[in-house]
Image (spheres, helix red, strand yellow):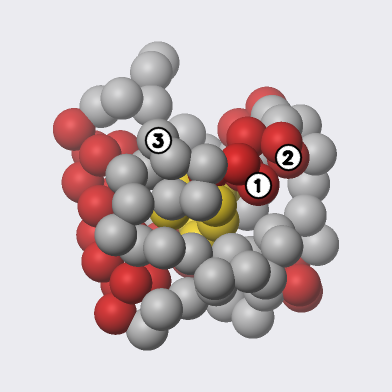
Amino acid sequence: MSRQTTAWRDLARQFRALCARTDEPCALCLGPIDYSLSGRHPDGFSADHIEPIGKGGALIPSMDGLRPAHMRCNSSRGAGRSVDATAWGW
C-alpha cells in the first residue's frame, strides 16, 4: 500500500499545521524547520514516522506516531534506522 493515500496526505497536512503553529524544530537534528518551504525542499517539513514502516510501524499512524523533521534528515535516516523515542518529548 502506498503512503500517497488521501488518509496519509490529510494526516501529514494536519500534523504540519500543528507543528507550524508552535514552530517545532526537527526532531532529528534539532534545527529550525522553514515551514514556508515545500516538503520537497531539503529544509522543508517532513512527517517522520517514529517507528519506521520498515520495522513494523504503521503506514498511517496516529499523530503520536509522528515527529517533525527536515526532508533531508528524514531521508538520510532511511527506512530502517530507529530514533530513540525519548529524544523527542512527544
Q: Dot 2, how many residues are within 10 Å of its Cα: few (below 14), some (14-19), or many (20+)?
A: some
Residue at 48%, 64% (x, y): give it.
33
Q: Amino acid at mark 1?
A: Cys
Residue 89 visible from this viewpoint: yes
Q: Secondary structure at mark 3?
A: loop
- Residue furthest to the top: 1
Q: Secondary structure at mark 1?
A: helix
Q: Amino acid at mark 2?
A: Arg
N-terminal label among 2 and 3: 3
Q: Which residue is mark 3?
A: 40
Measure the alpha-carbon separation of dots 2 and 1: 6 Å
Task: Give above or below for 38 relative to 15.
Answer: above
Task: Give above or below for 28 relative to 71.
Answer: below
N-terminal label among 1 and 3: 3
Task: Give above or below for 11 relative to 77.
Answer: below
Number of marks drawn: 3
Q: Amino acid at mark 3?
A: Arg
Task: Give above or below for 46 relative to 28.
Answer: above
Relative image position of residue 86 (x, y in whole percent): 76, 74
Give me the disc on residue 77. Answer: 2
Q: Dot 1, how many residues are within 10 Å of its Cα: few (below 14), some (14-19), or many (20+)?
A: some
Residue at 29%, 59% (x, y): give it.
36
Q: Which residue is mark 1?
A: 73
| Disc number lying in front (2 or 3) | 3
Residue at 29%, 79% (x, y): give it.
21
Find out whether the residues at labels 1 and 3 contact each other: C-beta distance under 8 Å.
Answer: no
Relative image position of residue 22 (x, y in whole percent): 37, 83
Q: Secondary structure at mark 2?
A: helix
Measure the alpha-carbon separation of dots 1 and 3: 12 Å
